Image (spheres, grey):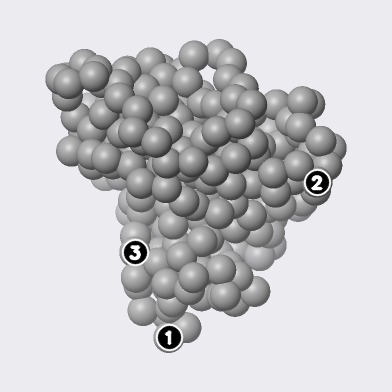
Amino acid sequence: MLTTLLLPALLLAPSSDNLLLNPSAETGDLSAWTDALGNGFNVDDGSVGNVPAVEGTFLFYAGAHQGLDAEIEQVVDLGSFAASIDAGSAQVFFSGWARSAQGGAVIDAARVILEYRDVSAAVLATFDSGVVQPSNQWKRVFDVRSLPPGTRSVRVRLRGTRPTGLSTEAYFDALLLRVSDFATRYCQANANSSGMPGRIDTFGSDVVADDCLYLVASQVPNTPGIFFHGGTRVQAPFGDGFRCTGGQIERVVPVVQAVGGVAQLQAPTSGITQGQTRHFQYWFRDQAAGAAGFNLTDAVEVAFN
């Protein structure tokens, strides 16, 4: 699993790839969502909570409801990805915007929870954003991970909690859930100063015309690094790890600074042609590990359409 971060906008994907229905409340109601607690939940256009939407006109707003907790949920069926999930090649990418509110010492908490479940709805893995902070501003929450074998659905939960009062100022908007399985992982990565081997994942699209390929390196130190790709597979000792990409190698600019053990960027596909296969890897500085002072992740192969 990748480290959970609160980041500025990045890693967007086409809305047609979104597995969530009514992800931004643009229907003007709670269509496709279920009131999990039966306490009530709301949709707002900014006229009640006085908070503008991240995208579009509407947003999800806990607002006035019974009790101190309010929650809506949506269960997404992943049965069509079963083969790649069980083969260990499917990754999930969730992104959403959430906003807590604070007045004095009182915090109305926004929280996002994901449950990755098997066919019997038993939970195999969980993501929990905790109380989204700092308050009174939109923050992006995301979860990126390989789906556990046996996963057949994801339960997405949006929860608002208040300590007192009649209304909960917890907001949610611009939610995205998608699964990718178009990349083939290969090569070995040695442990770095984080204590784990670096890992690279791809999200978006393998269609050149879409120009929507995103690269994410995880389990790396918070140092500068470079994504790069080449035309062939190799496994050659290099620094404190292995170079897994050969042939004509091209860097993906700019240099990336890892934050919270994660480095990410969009890789332009303008220089890649349909039918071409490219091999992606991430190089990073690692002075804390001693030795050569740099290391690399494993690699992924992408056949472009």
Give the number of the mark in front: 2 or 3.
Answer: 2
The amino acid at mark 1 is: Ser
Please identify the quarter of the rendering in which residue 6 is found: top left
Earlier along the polypeptide chain: callout 2 or callout 3?
A: 3
Q: Give residue 82's position: percent from left, percent from top.
A: 56, 75
Secondary structure, mark 2, is loop
* Apparent side of residue 105 relative to residue 35 in the rendered image (left or right): left
Residue drawn at x 81%, y 36% is 273
C-alpha separation, residue under disc 3 versus residue under disc 1: 14 Å
Q: Earlier in the sequence, mark 2 or mark 1?
A: 1
Quadrant location of residue 222?
Answer: top left
- Which residue corresponds to mark 3? 125
Q: Residue at x 56, y 68 (%)?
A: 84
| Residue 137 in view (yes/no) | no
Question: On screen, 257 above or below 45?
Answer: above
Question: How far across and down, in percent of the image, does residue 264 sit?
Answer: 49, 29
Element carrying mark 1: loop
Please name the amino acid that badge 3 sits on: Ala
Residue at the spot 68% in from the left edge and 33% down from the top edge: 55
Identify residue for label 1. Answer: 120
In percent of the image, x 64 and y 74: which residue is there? 80
Q: Which residue is mark 2?
A: 275
Query: Measured along the vertical axis of the image, is residue 88 above or below residue 145?
Result: below
Residue type, label 2:
Gly
